[in-house]
Amino acid sequence: MLWKDQYELGVPSIDEQHKELFRRVESFLQALRSAGSWEEKAPRLNETLEFMKGYVVEHFRDEEEYQLSINYPGYEHHKQLHIGMVDYVLEVSEQYERSGNNEDLMQQFGGRLLAWLINHVAAEDQRIADYARKKG
Amino acid sequence: MKDKLYKALVDATHNVLKLMLNVTEISDRPAVDFSCDDEVDIAIGIVGDFQGEVIYRFPVATSLNMVNIMSGMQFEEVDVFVTSAVSEIANIISGNVLTALSVDDVKCDILPPVQCKPDEDKEYDIKTSCYLNTAIGDICLTIRLNRA
């Protein structure tokens, strides 16, 4: 499983969203790496990509609202990381469509998304949890 | 400055390997001892107060181990996906190095990762390398910079 309990922040609403995000990314990676022709896999991948475009924005917004609610000092920096990822998802999505569903583009996206998401939740988001715990 | 760069690079790599891959058994070895014929080489350009790059040399086995751990899937060969995931790890480590250096008022930005071949011919004002032996394989990192 992609999700690990050590990623939990202790904020139930955010943790649930993270788990859903990891479930979707895992499903996306399984489809991306499964046997079969690209034509067969493309519809499932397109569906996940569409979900990600909406869900990522919604999750980032909720996470930023939580940061504001606890006066998290790293809010602006964290928001920039979110903006960077949303821009990347939208850019890849457009390129993918323009290219007529180019497989390499999607494999490249999958690899970067995997590493980015794990680092973001395991490192960047944990700083929010550390701050909230210290604040009490 | 060279010592600070070395420490920032080693600390950032330790930290990223621990947080992202649960790898804690890491030992430093002399960079000259690093030897590998089949590797994924990634360069992250640096611009700002200093200009240059960080070069990451990940042997194929190390690259595959990193991606296998992150994904929980079995990757048998280096392809676009693996190269992209490994490049993002290099990107994350480099970002953390620059964050550490910013404490000393060094202002730099990183450029997107590119695949490269290690090139030893160029001259740099500051250059330092480290060779890390870890539970998932070896890694060799070089940071080489010129003052802007």
Image: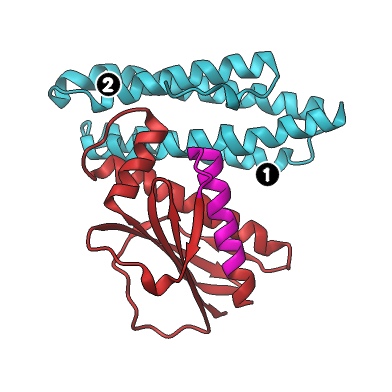
Residue A46 vs residue B73, the one in the foreground: B73
Residue that label 1 marks:
A77
Q: Is residue B15 magenta?
A: yes
Callout 1: SS? helix
Dot 2: chain letter? A
Q: Which chain is red?
A: B
Residue B56 to residue A3: above or below: below
- In the picture, residue A114 is in which quadrant? top left
Please state the horizontal and vertical placement of residue B34, each as a whole percent of the image. Answer: 36, 67
Quick check: can you spot residue A66?
yes
Q: Is residue B28 magenta?
A: no
Residue A35 to residue B27: above or below: above
Residue that label 2 marks:
A31
For the N terminus of chain A, the image quarter is: top left
Question: Is A95 on the left-hand or right-hand side of B51?
Answer: left
**Alpha carbon separation for disc pair 1 and 2:** 33 Å
Q: Are marks 1 and 2 on the same chain?
A: yes
Camera-nearest label, 1 or 2: 2
Residue for point 72% across, 33% down: A128
- The residue under label 1 is which amino acid type? His
Report the span colored magenta. Answer: B6-25
For disc 2, the neighbor class at 10 Å (few under 14, some 14 to 19, many from 20) is: some
Q: Which chain is cyan?
A: A
Question: Is A32 on the left-hand or right-hand side of B127?
Answer: left
